[in-house]
Structure formats: C-alpha cells, structure tokens
Image (cartoon, rainbow, N blue to C red):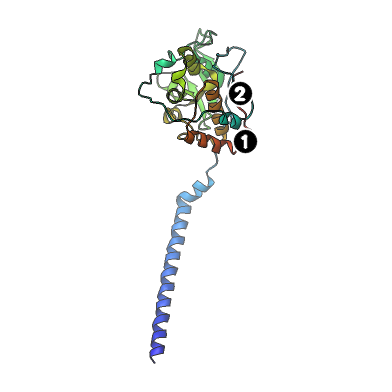
Amino acid sequence: MTVSWRAYRSARRRSRQAWVLLAVLTLAAAGSAGWFFTAGQFAAAEPAIAGPSEAPVFDGTWMKPVVPVHTVPQGSALDALEGLPVKGRAPKDNYQREAFGQAWLDVDRNGCDTRNDILRRDLTAVGFTEGSKCRVASGAIQEPYTGKAVEFRRGAESSKEIQIDHVVALGDAWQKGAQGLNSQQRQSLANDPLNLIAADGPANQQKSASDAATWLPKNKNFRCHYVARQISVKASYELWVTQPEKDAMKRVLDSCPDQPTISAR
C-alpha cells in the first residue's frame, strides 16, 4: 500500500510539471504570434538599404588636384591598411579648426570654393544661383551614408540637409598625426576632394569626429568604399590608426577583400 501511495504522488507531481510546461509553451507561442502580427512581420519584411556603393572623387574637367603629402598607394585597401602605423590617440585639448586653415577655401584655385566644388561634383541636375558659375543653388543626390534620395535647395535651413563631410574627420586627424604636418599640408587635407563627400546632414552630425571603430554609414553597401577612402586619406597624409580602428576596418574589408584604394587622380 505504501509503494502505491508513493507511486501515486510521483505520478501527480509529474502531471503538474507537464501542465506547467504546457502553459509556459502556450504563453510563449501566444507572445511570439502577437509580436509577429504587430511589429515582427514588418521588421522581417523591412528591405535592405539599396544606396550607392561608392561616391565621386574627382572631375578633371573643372577641378584641379590638391597636392597631398604622398600619392595614394595603388593596390588593395587591405594592403594599404597594413602599411599604416598603429598608435594611440594624441591629446585633443589643443585642437582648433583654424589649424586646418579657413573653412572652404579655393585651395585648387579653380575660381570656386571647396564646398561648392563638392556640391557640384556630387549632385546631379545642378542649378546655380543667378549670375554665378560656382554657387550651387539646387540639385539631387542619392545620399551615400543613408541611401536616401535627397533634393538640395540652398537656404538658411534647407542647406543643412546636405553637408560636406570630412571622411577622415579633422578632429580625428589631429589626434593621429596631423599635428606633425605643416599648415599648408593640413589645409590640403581639409580641402582635398578625396577626403570630402556630400552627405546627409543628420548622419554627418551623428558621425562628428568618430573613426571607423565607433561610426560607420548606415548604408552597408557603401562601407567598403568609405573605409577604403579613409585608409587612402590616412596613407596620403601620414596619419595613423588605433588598434580598434584597424580591427573595425579589417572587419569591413573582409567582405570585399579586393576593394582597391581610392585616388583623386
């Protein structure tokens, strides 16, 4: 009789455990179904960004090349990355934008300032302000960092929608070798078409002075070109990378090992 009672209690315990497990599985299934029919189905169906995979660099019909410290090494971006020194950041407390010269000079002496040169290079259907062959008033762009199609209109507020980004941010450059350049070389770095891209204003503000370890374009199709362009600029202006930055660049280039360096020639 004792054995039967123990068997009975054991059977009841197993039965309760089975019912608890069944209840948990039912609740989990209901939760998953609820997520799918509210947000999940839309997240699953969200398309990948189909933005551009590269950006313009140089148009020799009206732009003149800026003289860098060195020519960009030809070959793969991975090989060029291996050639960059790896060091820690130098102090930034003495950084001033003026160390790179006045913003948007006409460094190539083609008659137009750098900002308008880059807008003209990167936009399509470009319109100029009345009486000017330099001052860009309107245009369109398939913006590379977000992949969005953007209409540019010059104005006190609307101009902010498209900004000119330094691919290697000047603050980052200052901490990684630019302090050792002379004033003319820093001025070239700040105005070199290789280091400039017309970009989405909010994305540019979010990037700020970040390197590849802390910020990459949302448009993944563009990351190989973006990282190769950063490497090319750093090689051309004797700048270094930190170890986390190098690791981040290598992760990007692992998906495109044949990505070449980028040149403004």
| Residue to which mark 1 is pinned | 257
Q: Is mark 1 on a helix, strand or loop?
A: loop
| Residue to which mark 2 is pinned | 73
Contact between marks 2 and 1 (CB within 8 A): the answer is: no
Mark whose residue sits in front, 2 or 1: 2
Q: Residue furthest left?
A: 93
Residue 243 can be seen in this image: yes
Image quadrant of residue 175?
A: top left
In the depicted structure, whether residue 254 falls above or below residue 151: below
Q: Residue furthest bottom?
A: 1
Q: Residue at x 41, y 89 (%)?
A: 4
Q: Is 68 on the left-hand or right-hand side of 258?
A: left
Instruction: Point out the image quarter for the N terminus.
Output: bottom left
Instruction: Point out the image quarter for the C terminus.
Output: top right
Q: What amino acid is found at the position of numbered circle 2 in the picture?
A: Pro
Whole-percent x and y of residue 149?
53, 29
